[in-house]
Image (tube, rainbow, N blue to C red):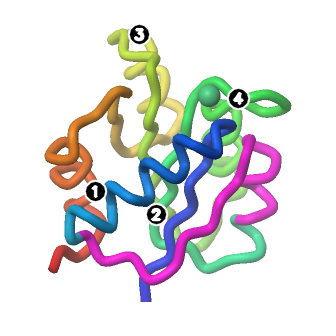
Amino acid sequence: MSKVLLVDDSAVMRKIIQRNIKESGLIVHEFVEAGDGAQALEKVSANELDLILCDWNMPNMSGIEFVKNLRSLNLPKKIPVIMVTTEGSDAKKSEAKESGANDYITKPFTADQLRDTLGKYLMIN
Ligand SMILES: [Mg+2]
């Protein structure tokens, strides 16, 4: 069973990512959604997650603040976090990595990019 948390303040973007994942043959049994970092933290405590895809710019709590908060919890299982964001600069990428993100996808992404990056964390049909 694989459960993936999609964190983005755009419901449309969450749907696009979900559709791309399904079409690319990546195996996900359940999607959980959150509209900002604070909601995402609640979902983390309420679910056994295998992977988190996280936007950067969101109200209430940004993606980077979420990652820092998540990593400071020191959970027994380190859930991989992939940033999916329009913030594509090298400075942002290193900030994400230093904060505990595992990977980075820049929007707009292609189906191949999504599949290649997520394929490191999920099974593919
Ligand atoms: Mg956003």
From the image, tell me which residue sits under label 4.
Answer: 58
The N terminus - image quarter: bottom left
Sort mark 2 into few (<14), some (14-19) or many (20+) by Cα contacts within 10 Å.
Answer: many
Q: Which residue is mark 1?
A: 118
Residue 51, label in figure: 2
Q: Residue at x 81, y 46 (%)?
A: 38
- Measure the C-alpha gap from mark 3 to mark 2: 24 Å
Q: Is residue 96 above or below residue 14?
A: above
Residue occupying image coordinates x 33% and y 11%: 90
Name the front one of labels 3 and 2.
2
Residue 80 spot, x, y in % from top left? 44, 57
Q: Which label lies toward us, 2 or 4?
A: 4
**In this picture, residue 12 sits left or right of residue 92:** right
Q: Quadrant of residue 115?
A: bottom left
Q: Tell me what residue is drawn at x 29 percent, y 70 percent.
A: 122
Check disc 4 and give the amino acid type.
Answer: Met
- Is residue 38 rendered to the left or right of residue 2? right
